[in-house]
Image (cartoon, rainbow, N blue to C red):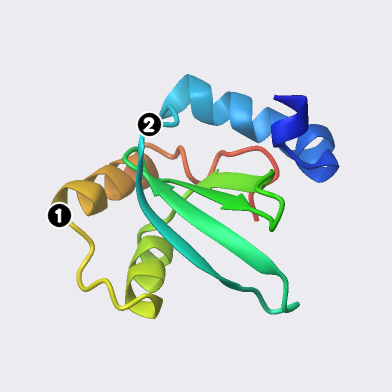
Amino acid sequence: MANKVTIHFAQDRIDRAAYIAETVGFGEIVRTAEYFNRNNLFETKQITETGVLIVRGSSGQIVTMFIMRPDQVEEIYRKNHWGRVPAWLMTKVKKNWKKGYTQNQPDYH
């Protein structure tokens, strides 16, 4: 995993990754968006079937990941003109929120 993640992720987000693995799991990637972020750096955002967002830098390394809130998944779908969030995915994201998984992630702000 060391060469597949950034130093930031390995040092500052590894506890969150373990939490995700123990609660909702990573699941399969169901949507991918590629774009330039606010710092004009290329990023890829990947949404998984468990409601996790994985952010990768231009090298493909994982920069961060987190369990999404309902408004976050809606925003990604809206910004990418993908239409409505599929009901099954929104149900999963809302269940994660109601169970407190989203709010209780390590270093989640």
Q: Which amino acid, mark 1?
A: Ala
- For marks 2 and 1, give the CA distance: 17 Å
Q: Which amino acid, mark 2?
A: Gly
Q: Which residue is mark 1?
A: 87
Q: Which residue is mark 2?
A: 27
Say which mark, if any, is on residue 57.
none
For this view, does 3 lie left or right of residue 44? Answer: right
* Residue drawn where x is 82% and y is 44% of the image: 8
Secondary structure at numbered mark 1: helix
* Depicted 32 relative to depicted 65: above or below: below
* Residue drawn where x is 65% and y is 74% of the image: 37
Q: Residue furthest front?
A: 59
The quarter of the image holding the N terminus is: top right
* Depicted 74 relative to depicted 62: above or below: below
Where does residue 10 sit, x and y in percent of width and height?
79, 33
For this view, does 107 lie left or right of residue 78? Answer: right
Where does residue 87 sit, x and y in percent of width and height?
15, 54
Q: Nearer the viewer, residue 90 or 37?
A: 37
